[in-house]
Image (tube, rainbow, N blue to C red):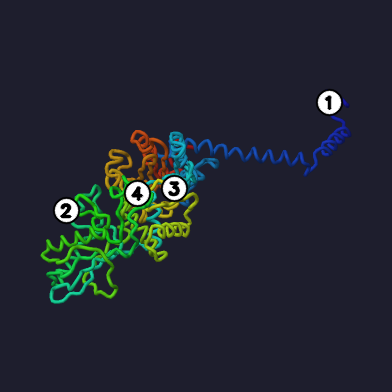
């Protein structure tokens, strides 16, 4: 080493050159060490904005409510480069959906093991708890029948009931034939007042009587004959218990007036075509038209002229009746009509095949699906939250299915539920109840000022005691209240980069 005149040391140039050479020997461009060091540096640099974004996004929700308007295209953006506001749409969605997701995940811990919950928000699935588990759906099964009916029959489809016979000089020569067209909503005007949930879109049988009167008929020399030949004569799903038959559903047939009830008798006949003929005869007599023969059943000749006819409301209204009031007879007759339209057989079995085919066509998962009836009363039915949710999401939350659901605290099976809650008058849902099974599936609209948007959800509870109010109501309440608190705010425009001169809130 050389010592300079000022007392400082100077490195030997030759030694310095040898040191640099050794360093270059050890660290060559493209060597594994260099590549590793370079990648590590880049990752560390890139992690900075990502970390900042994660940290600010978790706290921005508290500050974004006071954000000023978005900068115009020619404004100078003063928002920092690494601010979460640089990704407003992402931040908005994650801030809002993330809070709801966390709340719902915590609520799933209270669900029985034999349960499932699926929730979709803005096209994203935020909760999927046991989503593919096949469970007893109870009456929520009607959602699948409704979707299949819309696909197979079409939303404008109508059911037509006809009156056939030969009229001459004000007299029906021989019998008058009351031919059923599968209309599940045929009623007399004084019947709906007796129903727990009055029929929403009844088909008034008096219209046929009006047609007879208008044609000048004063008497019928034969009988009123009820014709139910459109469907088979299976009155009930064979596996249903005696306690369910007649009280909850059936007897079923293609000619069914007042759900098979005879207003002057406490007992339902086993044959709904006969009970319909009895009721129609009574109404004719009350209107001054005499009927000589006793009511009976039979099959009308196809060449008999039509005296009068009455048509139902469109299928969309029939479906609304089925879903809002959970009308079991309507569900079962729709199932048979699906079978008739899809295979030419008006039977329960053909209808089940038609429903499965329609769901497959609609890209609805049928894994684990087991259908025994249309109403969901049979305990062997199975469906997953995923299957039911797929039907609801395909409807978009504001289609025919959603519009036909009961309104919380206002109509149908929800008329006395969710009163004084955050979802009253807002949520539309299909309920389902069997011993050991409880269902709630539907939509919760939000932010009407920002356009139609809705949370779509399906909840199935199975297990001992779940149908008891003390068990399911706290779960229903917790989930629906969480859904009701969701909104479209803060939206992207409220948290976009701020223009120069804007008063920045406390958010980053």
Q: Disc 1 or 2, which lies upstream in sequence?
A: 1
Foreground mark, 2 or 3?
2
Foreground mark, 1 or 2?
2
Q: Disc 2 or 3, which lies upstream in sequence?
A: 2
Left or right placement of residue 436 versus residue 416 in this view: right
Residue occupied by mark 3: 382
Q: Is mark 4 on a helix, strand or loop?
A: helix
Cα–Cα gap, marks 4 and 1: 80 Å
User: Which residue is more in the foreground, 504 or 287?
Assistant: 287
Which residue is rendered at x = 19% and y = 66% of the image? 223
Q: What element carries label 3?
A: loop
Q: Disc 4 or 1, which lies upstream in sequence?
A: 1
The reply to whether dot 2 and dot 3 touch (C-beta < 8 Å) is: no
Give neighbour class at mark 3: few <14, some 14-19, many 20+ (Cα, 10 Å).
many
Q: Disc 3 or 4, which lies upstream in sequence?
A: 3
In the rendered view, would you say 335 is above or below 435? below
Cα–Cα gap, marks 2 and 4: 49 Å
Residue occupied by mark 4: 448
Q: Disc 3 or 1, which lies upstream in sequence?
A: 1
Give neighbour class at mark 4: few <14, some 14-19, many 20+ (Cα, 10 Å).
few
Which residue is rendered at x = 60% and y = 37% of the image? 48
Residue 203 appears in which quarter of the rendering?
A: bottom left
Residue at the limit of the structure toward the top, as seen here = 7
Residue occupied by mark 2: 264
User: Which residue is more in the foreground, 344 or 119?
Assistant: 344
Cα–Cα gap, marks 1 and 2: 123 Å
Q: Is mark 2 on a helix, strand or loop?
A: loop
The reply to whether dot 3 and dot 4 touch (C-beta < 8 Å) is: no
Foreground mark, 2 or 4?
2
């Amino acid at each position: 080493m050389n010592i300079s005149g000022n007392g400082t040391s100077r490195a030997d140039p030759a030694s310095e050159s040898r040191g640099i050479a050794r360093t270059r020997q050890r660290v060559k461009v493209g060597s594994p060490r260099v590549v590793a060091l370079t990648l590590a540096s880049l990752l560390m640099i890139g992690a900075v904005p990502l970390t900042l974004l994660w940290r600010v996004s978790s706290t921005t929700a508290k500050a974004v409510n006071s954000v000023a308007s978005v900068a115009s295209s020619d404004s100078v953006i003063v928002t920092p480069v690494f601010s979460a506001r640089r990704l407003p749409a992402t931040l908005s969605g994650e801030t809002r959906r993330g809070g709801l997701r966390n709340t719902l995940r915590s609520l799933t811990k209270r669900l029985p093991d034999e349960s499932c919950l699926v929730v979709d928000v803005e096209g994203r699935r935020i909760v999927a708890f046991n989503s593919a588990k096949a469970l007893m759906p109870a009456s929520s099964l009607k959602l699948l029948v409704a979707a299949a009916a819309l696909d197979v029959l079409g939303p404008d489809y109508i059911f037509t009931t006809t009156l056939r016979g030969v009229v001459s000089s004000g007299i029906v020569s021989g019998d008058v034939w009351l031919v059923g067209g599968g209309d599940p909503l045929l009623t007399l005007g004084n019947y709906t007042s007796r129903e727990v949930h009055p029929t929403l879109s009844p088909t008034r049988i008096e219209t046929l009587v009006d047609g007879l009167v208008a044609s000048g008929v004063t008497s019928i020399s034969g009988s009123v004959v009820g014709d139910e030949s459109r469907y088979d004569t299976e009155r009930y799903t064979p596996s249903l218990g005696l306690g369910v038959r007649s009280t909850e559903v059936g007897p079923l047939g293609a000619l069914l007036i007042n759900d098979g009830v005879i207003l002057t008798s406490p007992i339902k006949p086993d044959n709904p075509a006969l009970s319909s003929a009895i009721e129609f005869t009574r109404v004719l007599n009350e209107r001054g038209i005499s009927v000589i023969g006793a009511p009976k059943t039979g099959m009308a000749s196809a060449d008999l002229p039509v005296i009068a006819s009455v048509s139902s409301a469109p299928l969309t209204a029939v479906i609304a009746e089925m879903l809002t009031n959970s009308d079991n007879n309507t569900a079962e007759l729709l199932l048979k009509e699906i079978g008739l339209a899809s295979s030419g057989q008006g039977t329960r079995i053909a209808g089940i095949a038609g429903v499965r085919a329609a769901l497959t066509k609609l890209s609805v998962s049928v894994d684990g699906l087991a259908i025994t009836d249309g109403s969901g009363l049979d305990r062997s039915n199975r469906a997953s939250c995923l299957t039911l949710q797929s039907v609801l999401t395909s409807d978009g939350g504001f289609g025919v299915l959603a519009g036909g659901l009961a309104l919380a605290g206002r109509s149908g099976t929800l008329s006395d539920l969710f009163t004084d809650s955050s979802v009253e008058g807002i949520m539309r849902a299909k309920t389902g109840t069997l011993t050991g099974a409880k269902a709630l599936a539907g939509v919760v609209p939000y932010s009407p000022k920002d356009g139609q948007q809705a949370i779509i959800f399906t909840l199935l509870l199975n297990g001992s005691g779940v149908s008891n109010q003390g068990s399911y109501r706290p779960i229903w309440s917790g989930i629906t209240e969480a859904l009701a608190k969701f909104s479209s705010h803060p939206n992207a425009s409220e948290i976009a980069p701020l223009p120069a001169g804007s008063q920045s809130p406390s958010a980053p």
